[in-house]
Image (cartoon, grey):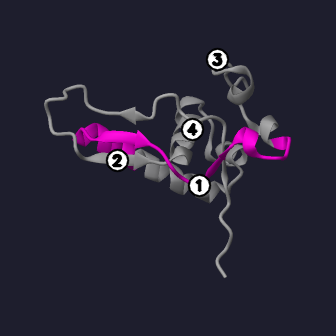
Amino acid sequence: MARPKKWRRVCQLPEVNKFGPVDLSKNTEQSIIMTVEEYETIRLMDLEGLNQEQSADIMGVARSTIQRIYESARKKLADSLVNGKILKIEGGDYKLCNDFTDKECCDRCINYRHRWGKNMRFRG
């Protein structure tokens, strides 16, 4: 029997979920799909400046899982930037923070986006 899938906690879906080259005259049929949890890992580690352990705690997964997700996300970002491919953020194995029944999730959410808006930032 297969092990049940562990959902990753995500604070909020991205406001913009499609990125690509500005020069539309080039053939941009190729696209890369980045999962929502890959996006969340990039946001937590690169934008918010958290380490793998802190990010893993917030998303409710092991540090080794965060490391694997982060490596995959960075590879996709690099492929999109270097090769001019469209990057789409969609799908994955995640639940939004407010979909969890435990109140602990809101305490882990570093910027409380789902409750007070996107202008709250991590200070700690």
- Residue for badge 2: 32
Q: Which residues are magenta?
A: 75-104
Res 117 visible: yes
Looking at the image, residue 48 sits to the left or right of residue 75; the answer is right
Q: Which quadrant would the N terminus be assigned to in this image?
A: bottom right
Location of residue 79 by image quarter: top left
As drawn, the residue found furthest toward the top would be 119
Question: What is the CA distance from the residue labelled 3 to the residue labelled 4?
Answer: 18 Å
Residue 15 locus on image (x, y percent): 52, 28
- Residue for badge 1: 93
Disc sitting over residue 119 in the figure: 3
Of residues 66 and 39, which is closer to you in this image? 39
Say whether disc 1 or disc 4 marks the residue closer to the N-terminus.
4
- Residue for badge 4: 45
Q: Secondary structure at mark 3?
A: loop
As drawn, the residue found furthest toward the right would be 103
Question: What is the CA distance from the residue labelled 2 to the residue labelled 3?
Answer: 29 Å
Q: Nearer the viewer, mark 3 or mark 1?
A: 1
Q: Secondary structure at mark 1?
A: loop
Residue 46 locus on image (x, y percent): 52, 34
